[in-house]
Image: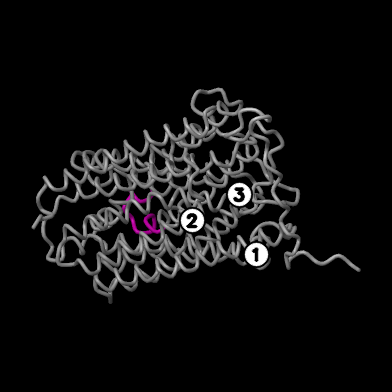
């Protein structure tokens, strides 16, 4: 039987994952070459604008993500080095999630009014304050640092996506290319995590556990400068929205497969959707949920998946080392991040080939994630098998981030996009707070079963939300939508 303690076995898995990543990434370009011949050779009239915008977005996003990776793994160790009790550490973690739940939601919703660029810069500023205050070591400053960290996390997971989605639509770029952007962001996030993991280990060995937090502050300062210089000025929407992006292509040249109108005539314009309520902010987002419950159901399904990811953080170590065996956790973490890269590259390949709708791919992602956790529950006696299944789950997580961003870009109206994204995180933060309490009373196997059940429930809700959305679109297309009042006789 292969033992997880053997580095050779872990190196083999890591090498295989890297080879698969390279295969998917190269395959994506060949798929682009076959399906969209004007995309790769630079002849598409909007390709240059798309490439510049993607580079600008990734510059800011990956720098903030690097800061998050620097501080996240060492937060608990820093609290322990400050001689805090387990109860105090738990309270600080709960405070961060509560801050994201309450204050972060309120501040994040302002992005639809003051601009997503400003909110993204605000995320970097709050992260800087959080890192600096946490490094001081005094308990009141630790509390303030966690408050800032919770707000920054909420802004980071909403304003960045809202900005790139809105900028992509307003630049009249094909919506298919946005999916590739999200896939590349997930792939790049995996690379950043591996590099940061190595760098943070070196910094900690040389300067102590506070060094990664200073590096995180430096990354966020660089991100603040990059966003300020590179990103376009914030745009706010003041007119009613008739679709998720407010943009209807008017030229056949913006379609990725269009070579000429004679060879590929443009498709008919999309059917009109029921206009959401005129209110904006949180009240407008709640009114949107009442008008289209499928959007609220989609948010709940996404929250269940992300809640499962947070729960996974608590139980993967004891699941792989039930007897507290010394394991090469650095290699294990590198393999997990390579699996995340593989998931992002797989999504980019699917998006570039255009052979599977993102809705169908999303359900497949949920199903594979559920199966991987369930099989991990029944393979507890073989830690190496559990490790391979956990790598599969991490690959699913890498595909999920890009899939979720694409789904949200298709269904959330631009006028309330940042607000809705923050409201989507409300059940997630509540779920994470509840899971933290359950870790004290549930065993590792029970947490694994709970995660599988949450993901299975998310699969069912996602399928229902997407089916409802499809029926609504078909009914609107046929002029039979129940949301549209009948013509007077």
Residue 172 is situated, as x and y percent measured from the top left of the image, at 65, 36
Residue 469 is situated, as x and y percent measured from the top left of the image, at 61, 61
Mark closer to the observer (3, 2): 2
Q: Which residue position holds label 3? A: 111
Q: Earlier in the sequence, mark 1 or mark 3?
A: 3
Q: CA distance from mark 1 to mark 3?
A: 22 Å
Q: Pick the residue in front: 261 or 252.
A: 261
Left or right: 353 with respect to 479?
A: left
Residue at figure coordinates x 48%, y 56% from the top left:
360
Mark closer to the observer (1, 3): 1
Q: In the rendered structure, are the residues bearing label 3 and label 2 in contact, judged by CB atoms less than 8 Å apart?
A: no
Span colored in magenta: 133-143
Dot 3: few (<14), some (14–19), or many (≥20) neighbours within 10 Å?
A: many
Residue 317 is situated, as x and y percent measured from the top left of the image, at 22, 60
Q: Quarter of the image holding residue 45?
A: top right
Vertical arrangement, residue 275 with respect to residue 290, above or below: above
In the image, which disc is placed on residue 251?
A: none
Dot 2: few (<14), some (14–19), or many (≥20) neighbours within 10 Å?
A: few
Q: CA distance from mark 2 to mark 1?
A: 20 Å
Q: Which residue position holds label 1? A: 292
Mark closer to the observer (2, 1): 2
Q: Quarter of the image holding residue 188?
A: top left
Q: CA distance from mark 3 to mark 2?
A: 31 Å
Vertical arrangement, residue 224 with respect to residue 448, above or below: above
Vertical arrangement, residue 155 with respect to residue 92, above or below: above
Left or right: 371 with respect to 9?
A: right
Q: Which residue position holds label 2? A: 360
Q: In the rendered structure, are the residues bearing label 2 and label 1 in contact, judged by CB atoms less than 8 Å apart?
A: no
């Amino acid at each position: 039987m292969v033992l997880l303690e053997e580095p050779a076995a872990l190196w083999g898995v890591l090498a295989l994952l890297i080879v698969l990543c390279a295969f998917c990434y190269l395959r994506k370009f060949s798929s682009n070459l076959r399906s969209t011949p004007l995309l790769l050779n630079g002849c598409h009239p909007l390709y240059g604008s798309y490439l510049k915008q993607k580079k600008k977005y990734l510059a800011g996003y990956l720098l903030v993500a690097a800061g998050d990776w620097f501080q996240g793994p060492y937060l608990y160790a820093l609290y322990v080095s400050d001689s805090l009790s387990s109860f105090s550490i738990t309270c600080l973690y709960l405070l961060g999630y509560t801050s994201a739940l309450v204050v972060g939601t309120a501040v994040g919703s302002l992005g639809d009014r003051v601009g997503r660029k400003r909110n993204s810069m605000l995320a970097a500023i709050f992260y800087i304050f959080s890192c600096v205050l946490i490094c001081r070591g005094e308990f009141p400053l630790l509390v303030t640092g966690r408050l800032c960290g919770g707000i920054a996390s909420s802004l980071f997971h909403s304003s960045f996506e809202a900005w790139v989605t809105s900028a992509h639509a307003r630049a009249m770029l094909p919506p298919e290319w946005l999916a590739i952007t999200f896939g590349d962001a997930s792939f790049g996030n995996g690379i950043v995590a591996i590099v940061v993991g190595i760098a943070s280990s070196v910094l900690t060995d040389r300067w102590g556990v506070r060094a990664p937090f200073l590096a995180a502050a430096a990354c966020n300062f660089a991100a603040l400068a990059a966003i300020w210089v590179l990103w376009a000025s914030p745009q706010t929407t003041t007119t009613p929205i008739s679709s998720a992006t407010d943009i209807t292509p008017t030229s056949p040249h913006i379609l990725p497969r269009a070579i000429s109108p004679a060879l590929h005539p443009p498709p008919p314009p999309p059917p009109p959707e029921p206009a959401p309520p005129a209110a904006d902010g949180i009240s407008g987002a709640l009114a949107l949920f009442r008008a289209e419950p499928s959007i609220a159901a989609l948010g709940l399904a996404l929250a269940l998946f992300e809640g499962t990811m947070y729960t996974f953080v608590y139980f993967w170590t004891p699941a792989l080392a039930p007897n507290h065996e010394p394991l090469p956790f650095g290699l294990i973490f590198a393999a997990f991040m390579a699996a995340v890269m593989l998931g992002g590259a797989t999504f980019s390949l699917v998006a570039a080939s255009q052979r599977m709708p993102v809705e169908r791919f999303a359900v497949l992602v949920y199903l594979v994630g559920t199966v991987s956790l369930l099989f991990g529950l029944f393979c507890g006696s073989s830690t190496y098998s559990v490790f391979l299944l956990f790598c599969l789950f991490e690959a699913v997580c890498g595909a999920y981030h890009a899939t979720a961003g694409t789904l949200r870009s298709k269904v959330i109206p631009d006028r309330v996009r940042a607000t809705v994204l923050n409201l989507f995180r409300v059940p997630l933060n509540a779920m994470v707070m509840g899971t933290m309490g359950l870790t004290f009373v549930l065993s590792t196997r029970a947490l694994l079963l709970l995660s599988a059940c949450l993901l299975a429930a998310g699969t069912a809700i996602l399928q229902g939300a997407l089916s409802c959305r499809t029926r609504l679109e078909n009914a609107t297309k046929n002029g039979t939508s129940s949301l549209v009042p009948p013509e007077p006789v």
